[in-house]
Image (tube, rainbow, N blue to C red):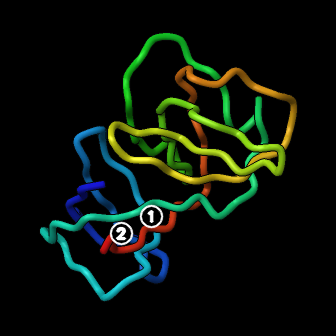
Amino acid sequence: MNIEITGKGLKKDEVHFGTDFGEGKGIWCGTPVKPGDQCTAEFELPALLMRWVDIVPVSGGGYGIRTEGNDVILTGVLENIEEDGTGCLRLGEDSIMLECLGEPMALGGFVEIRAKEIRMYPAL
Protein backbone atom coordinates (compact mmCIF):
# COMPACT_ATOMS: atom_id res chain seq x y z
CA MET A 1 0.00 0.00 0.00
CA ASN A 2 1.27 3.46 -0.83
CA ILE A 3 1.59 5.61 2.28
CA GLU A 4 2.94 9.03 3.16
CA ILE A 5 4.51 9.50 6.56
CA THR A 6 2.78 12.46 8.20
CA GLY A 7 4.38 12.45 11.65
CA LYS A 8 6.07 10.57 14.47
CA GLY A 9 4.09 8.82 17.21
CA LEU A 10 4.72 8.53 20.93
CA LYS A 11 5.91 4.90 20.90
CA LYS A 12 9.27 3.73 19.57
CA ASP A 13 9.14 3.55 15.73
CA GLU A 14 5.46 4.64 15.69
CA VAL A 15 4.50 6.80 12.72
CA HIS A 16 1.35 8.51 11.53
CA PHE A 17 0.57 7.98 7.86
CA GLY A 18 -1.88 8.91 5.15
CA THR A 19 -3.25 6.76 2.32
CA ASP A 20 -5.90 7.07 -0.38
CA PHE A 21 -8.29 5.48 2.16
CA GLY A 22 -7.62 7.70 5.17
CA GLU A 23 -5.12 8.20 7.95
CA GLY A 24 -3.77 5.91 10.65
CA LYS A 25 -0.78 5.07 12.80
CA GLY A 26 1.43 2.06 13.11
CA ILE A 27 4.84 0.70 14.02
CA TRP A 28 7.35 1.12 11.17
CA CYS A 29 9.58 -1.97 10.89
CA GLY A 30 12.21 -0.78 8.45
CA THR A 31 14.91 1.80 7.97
CA PRO A 32 13.96 5.06 9.70
CA VAL A 33 11.47 7.34 7.93
CA LYS A 34 10.56 10.97 8.43
CA PRO A 35 7.48 13.10 7.75
CA GLY A 36 6.99 13.65 4.04
CA ASP A 37 8.50 10.30 3.01
CA GLN A 38 6.50 8.30 0.46
CA CYS A 39 6.68 4.52 1.02
CA THR A 40 5.14 1.32 -0.22
CA ALA A 41 4.27 -0.75 2.85
CA GLU A 42 2.85 -4.12 3.73
CA PHE A 43 0.57 -4.12 6.77
CA GLU A 44 0.47 -6.78 9.47
CA LEU A 45 -2.03 -7.13 12.31
CA PRO A 46 0.01 -8.91 15.01
CA ALA A 47 -2.78 -9.40 17.59
CA LEU A 48 -5.19 -12.32 17.59
CA LEU A 49 -8.56 -10.79 16.67
CA MET A 50 -12.02 -11.96 17.78
CA ARG A 51 -14.72 -12.25 15.13
CA TRP A 52 -17.89 -10.33 16.09
CA VAL A 53 -15.84 -8.27 18.61
CA ASP A 54 -12.75 -6.91 16.82
CA ILE A 55 -14.10 -7.82 13.35
CA VAL A 56 -17.68 -6.75 12.68
CA PRO A 57 -19.74 -6.53 9.48
CA VAL A 58 -20.66 -3.05 8.24
CA SER A 59 -23.38 -2.02 5.84
CA GLY A 60 -22.51 -0.11 2.73
CA GLY A 61 -19.24 -0.21 0.92
CA GLY A 62 -16.05 1.72 0.98
CA TYR A 63 -12.51 1.11 2.06
CA GLY A 64 -11.14 3.14 4.93
CA ILE A 65 -8.47 3.68 7.56
CA ARG A 66 -9.04 5.87 10.60
CA THR A 67 -8.04 6.16 14.24
CA GLU A 68 -10.31 6.23 17.26
CA GLY A 69 -8.41 6.85 20.47
CA ASN A 70 -5.60 4.29 20.55
CA ASP A 71 -7.24 1.99 17.99
CA VAL A 72 -6.82 1.91 14.23
CA ILE A 73 -10.00 0.99 12.32
CA LEU A 74 -9.60 -0.72 8.94
CA THR A 75 -12.64 -1.09 6.68
CA GLY A 76 -12.38 -3.56 3.84
CA VAL A 77 -13.66 -6.79 2.34
CA LEU A 78 -13.22 -9.98 4.36
CA GLU A 79 -11.86 -12.22 1.62
CA ASN A 80 -11.01 -15.44 3.40
CA ILE A 81 -10.75 -17.20 6.76
CA GLU A 82 -9.04 -20.61 6.88
CA GLU A 83 -9.83 -23.32 9.43
CA ASP A 84 -6.72 -22.35 11.42
CA GLY A 85 -8.04 -18.77 11.78
CA THR A 86 -5.74 -17.08 9.28
CA GLY A 87 -7.63 -14.62 7.15
CA CYS A 88 -7.30 -11.88 4.59
CA LEU A 89 -8.78 -8.38 4.48
CA ARG A 90 -8.77 -6.62 1.12
CA LEU A 91 -8.22 -2.88 1.28
CA GLY A 92 -8.41 -1.62 -2.30
CA GLU A 93 -5.81 -3.54 -4.30
CA ASP A 94 -3.90 -4.60 -1.17
CA SER A 95 -4.38 -7.55 1.16
CA ILE A 96 -3.74 -7.58 4.89
CA MET A 97 -3.19 -10.90 6.64
CA LEU A 98 -4.74 -11.50 10.05
CA GLU A 99 -5.40 -14.21 12.63
CA CYS A 100 -8.77 -14.57 14.28
CA LEU A 101 -10.97 -16.76 16.47
CA GLY A 102 -14.70 -16.95 17.02
CA GLU A 103 -17.96 -17.82 15.37
CA PRO A 104 -17.98 -18.04 11.55
CA MET A 105 -18.58 -14.93 9.48
CA ALA A 106 -19.79 -14.47 5.92
CA LEU A 107 -17.02 -13.84 3.44
CA GLY A 108 -17.04 -11.27 0.65
CA GLY A 109 -18.68 -8.45 2.61
CA PHE A 110 -17.34 -5.29 4.16
CA VAL A 111 -16.11 -5.46 7.76
CA GLU A 112 -14.46 -3.13 10.23
CA ILE A 113 -11.41 -4.38 12.06
CA ARG A 114 -10.43 -2.63 15.27
CA ALA A 115 -6.71 -3.12 15.95
CA LYS A 116 -4.57 -1.91 18.83
CA GLU A 117 -1.43 -2.11 16.70
CA ILE A 118 -0.51 -2.25 13.03
CA ARG A 119 3.00 -3.12 11.94
CA MET A 120 4.21 -1.83 8.60
CA TYR A 121 7.10 -3.26 6.59
CA PRO A 122 8.73 -1.78 3.50
CA ALA A 123 7.44 -3.64 0.43
CA LEU A 124 10.18 -4.85 -1.87
Q: Secondary structure at mark 1?
A: strand
| For residue 32, above or below residue 15 | below
Residue beneath the point at 82% across and 28% down: 104
Disc 1 residue crowd, few under 14, some 14–19, many 20+, Cα 10 Å: many
Q: Distance between the Cα atoms at labels 2 and 1? A: 6 Å
Residue on which disc 1 sits = 26
Q: Secondary structure at mark 2?
A: strand
Q: Quadrant of residue 8?
A: bottom left
Kind of residue indicated by mark 2: Val
- Look at the numbered discs 2 and 1 and tell me whether their residues touch, using CB distance below 8 Å: yes
Residue beneath the point at 34% across and 74% down: 122
Q: Position of residue 66 (x, y in %)?
A: 41, 41
Q: Quadrant of the C terminus?
A: bottom left
Q: Position of residue 22 (x, y in %)?
A: 30, 41
Side of 98 where 19 appears, left or right: left
Q: Residue furthest top?
A: 60
Q: Quadrant of the N terminus?
A: bottom left
Side of 75 where 82 appears, left or right: right
Kind of residue indicated by mark 1: Gly
Side of 60 where 7 appears, left or right: left
Dot placed on the residue nearer the N-terminal end, 2 or 1: 2
Q: Could you say which disc has been placed on residue 15 in the image?
A: 2
Q: Position of residue 116 (x, y in %)?
A: 61, 56
Q: Quadrant of residue 93?
A: top left
Residue beneath the point at 75% across and 56% down: 48
